[in-house]
Image (cartoon, rainbow, N blue to C red):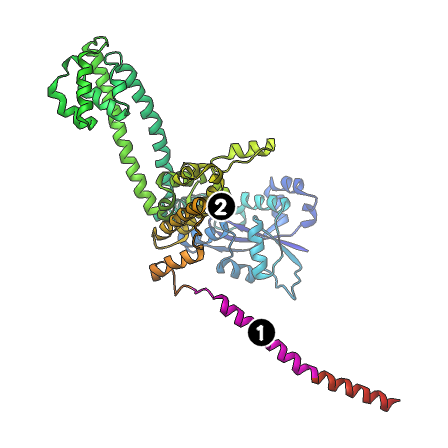
Amino acid sequence: MSTFLLFESASGFGLFEVTASDELAQGSDAVQRSVESMERFGKSVKLAAFKPFTSAANALEQINAVSESQLTDDLKNFLTTNLPKVKAGKAKFKLGVAEAKLGSAIQEETGVPCECNEYVGELLRGVRQHLATFIKGLEDKDMSRAQLGLAHSYSRAKVKFNVNKADNMIIQAIALLDTLDKDVNTFVMRVREWYSWHFPELVKICNDNYQYAQLALLIKDKGSLNEDKLEALKEIVGEEDKAKEIIEAGKMSMGQDISPIDLINIETFARRVISLAEYRQKLFTYLSDKMHAVAPNLSALIGELVGARLISHAGSLTNLAKYPASTVQILGAEKALFRALKTKGNTPKYGLIFHSSFIGRAKQRNKGRISRYLANKCSIASRIDCFLENSTDAFGLKLKDQVEERLRFYEEGVAPRKNLDVMQEVIATLGDAAGEGEPVEKKSKKDKKEKKEKKRKGGDEEAAAEAPAAADGEKKKKKKKKTEA
């Protein structure tokens, strides 16, 4: 049985025939030794056909299809034209391919038997190494130039895949937001500790970190505190009584005096902390806008921060949409899960979705049940966001109402609506923007009963019609027996 090799290069598709298969049939080691010299390898493998790509766009289209294990029309025509004909589903040859999935696609479409193993891989490695020698007029410089251009266009196409769903920006923004939260808290604690040597009473009066940094920047030397700064203190704190309390505490403070150069350093550091806190607010606004644009239903259901953390942990919105609800439920609690499996203990009930307000509002006995239900709705919302062309948050708002109804059901026993009814209601309100055609109406129990009765009556009539025919047949058989006797 002869063997052919399909080789995909940056210049085009090549079809090679293994002529000296007996010499190379000893295994992959024999092939590796023959690959080293072109004289020996050229006697074993020869070029059967080569189809160059017509343009850079055509090359990108063909390679994209090959990477996704899809058989294009060009490749199909190339193989059917240059390979021997397959008669009655029996082929006297095999086609070696680099990817098993691509081989399955070729075999389904053309009926050509394909194989993918270590032996074929070594042969294709030899073809790649000596490709310029096999094809006349193709130089190494032209090959490297074509490979570089195709690699750039292929990578650029993958990076630019679905620009509107730029979930990688959400991943970077939520990571930076978490880092800023830690850093701002650390820096504010340093400001508190540093300024408390001069004005220790201020820590007990003001608990908010951002306000404390603003007060330290405004007050500076506590000896300068007087009624003139009352309005400025009131604007920061928000209460006149607390502003007066700060002024009185400054007059009777037990803190030590501070030198001007130390005060300048504290002011500079407090100003940096305030700018970081303000940037954190801007970053949160940016993240919220991005979540409403990329995953509106998920953000409407579970909130921008929790939704962004789910997308970040999954790697992308597409990956999150592919996860089942059971995986979404424990996403972020992988260590606890594997520890429980190892020790044969109780598995975790929730991961990142624990930070949702629904879990906190549920009673302790219902936390596991509501987390399972919420994960189910998050999975639905992420799939809608990923695959729906028209961006809308109507589904997310309805899913949120369903979770609220489920919470009420656990507490008060009020039966919630069915998911099918809710989704049909959303599609009806959106019209053609969200789905095509009218929503399918549910068949009532009465209609189902009538249909069953019709079927039963039809079956009875058929049985009644068949009964006399069977009786006539039996009478004829008896007459025949009597005549024979």
Residue 334 counted in the magenta span: no
Few, some or many residues within 10 Å of mark 1 (<14, 14–19, 20+): few
Residue 335 percent coordinates (x, y): 52, 32
Going from the N terminus, do you reach mark 1 or mark 2 first? 2
Residue 129 percent coordinates (x, y): 54, 43
Which quadrant holds residue 128? top right
The amino acid on which the numbered mark 2 sits, given as a three-letter code, is Ala
Q: Residue at x 21, y 22 (%)?
A: 215
The amino acid on which the numbered mark 1 sits, given as a three-letter code, is Lys
> For the magenta stretch, what is the residue range?
440-467
Q: Residue furthest front?
A: 412
Q: Can residue 66 be seen? A: yes
Few, some or many residues within 10 Å of mark 2 (<14, 14–19, 20+): many
Q: Which residue is mark 1?
A: 455
Q: Can residue 82 be seen? A: no
In the picture, the disc for residue 325 is: 2
Element type at marker 1? Answer: helix
Q: Nearer the viewer, residue 87 or 325?
A: 325
Which quadrant holds residue 113? bottom right
Residue 129 against residue 65 in the figure, above or below = above
Residue 55 against residue 151 in the figure, above or below = below
